[in-house]
Image (spheres, helix red, strand yellow):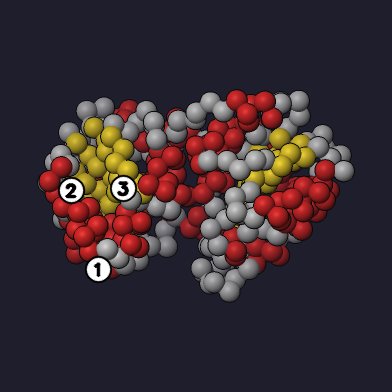
Amino acid sequence: MNVAIIRFSAMGDIILSAVFLPFLKEHYPQARIHWFVDTLFSPILEHSPYIDHLHIIPYKYTLQSKSPSRIYRLFRHLGRHTESFDVLIDMQGLLKSAFFGVFLPKKAFVGFDFFSIRERLASFFYSHKVHIPYSAHILKRNQAVLERGFSMLQSCTWDRVLQARHLAFYLPSCPKLETLLVPTRPHVLFVLEASTPNKMYPWQSFAQVGHLLQNRDVEIVLLWHARLEQAQMLYTNLKSHMPTILLPSLHLAEVKTLLSLVDVVVGGDTGIVHLAWALQVPSVTLYGNTPPARFSLEGRAHATLAGNPQANYSKQDFSIQKIPPEQVAQAILQVLGEAR
């Protein structure tokens, strides 16, 4: 039985979909699982032991090229060279992912219904539709659409579906990180960047958090992506007060391994912090303009703090900046204690 999942992006959404893979493979061992992912985020899923075939598609690049010939070749390839699927599940829930699925050979196409999806026209492409409020927690929505798709193979009791979530991800060896992060004291990773500015905690506030931890025998680790100058300023601010590591530029596959080597991950509502939760690494997630009720990832050794509990995606909402550093430092110590 061939089952295919469409989830091209974004990083956090892919992670919060992939966490179900160990459960799916355990309870549906006869299913060969295919996954369609955008090239940009493929390192998250590469070599996962629970994906039988990872289809890496330059989808965003192809559409942004606005080249009719390039777009035509992509969709022609889908119809001609992809094996048929018994069930195709659109976890992306967008018009572009539903349209992509139209070109794949399949017996059943599962997605969200008209009232449960952001881009409602997408629902008309599905043969089997799931009703769940769009405001429901992202993990509940992901489980609902997967449960509908896999129930076509056989019935199953969906209990404790995330217990083995960390096993979904392959972590490559990385000697340079293993040498750099010597486990002499707990490492606290500050994730300094996110996809949008209103998901970023200011580096000056991170500096205050660091100073509040300087007598706690921890080492601060700074992860940056595009804003090296700010990371350097934070490093300069902290290094004379406490052990601090400014990481080199890392590839996405290396970031996965990095998270497995630290003791707690702190940052905005972004894919890297989601991955820490998925890997069951203690984490503190800071929310600004995204509603915590829909996205919070909690549990033992995981904490969330919100600048605006009533947030609703406003681009003008920079409330993450209002989260007091004292609360962040306290949350870090709390999850470190819970992990021991």
Name the kind of residue labelled 1 in the image.
Answer: Leu
Question: At 67% across and 40% down in the image, what residue appears?
Answer: 247
- Residue placed under numbered mark 2 in the picture: 77
Name the kind of residue labelled 3 in the image.
Answer: Ile
Name the kind of residue labelled 2 in the image.
Answer: His
Question: At 61% across and 43% down in the image, what residue appears?
Answer: 249
Residue 319: percent from the left, percent from the top?
A: 65, 67
Quadrant holding the C terminus = top right
* Mark 1 vs mark 2, CA separation in Å: 24 Å
- Residue placed under numbered mark 3 in the picture: 57
Q: In this rendering, does residue 95 appear at all?
A: no
Q: Secondary structure at mark 2?
A: helix
**49 is higher (above) or lower (below) than 155:** above
Mark 1, other Cα within 10 Å: few <14 / some 14–19 / many ≥20: few
Residue 229: percent from the left, percent from the top?
A: 70, 55
The residue closer to the viewer here, 150 or 46, is 46
Q: Which mark is residue 121?
A: 1
In the rendered structure, the answer to whether residue 151 lies left or right of residue 161 reads left
Quadrant holding the N terminus = top left
* Label 1 with label 2: CB-CB less than 8 Å: no
Ranked by sequence position, the earlier of labels 1 and 2 is: 2
Residue 292: percent from the left, percent from the top?
A: 55, 58
Name the front one of labels 1 and 3.
3
Ranked by sequence position, the earlier of labels 1 and 3 is: 3
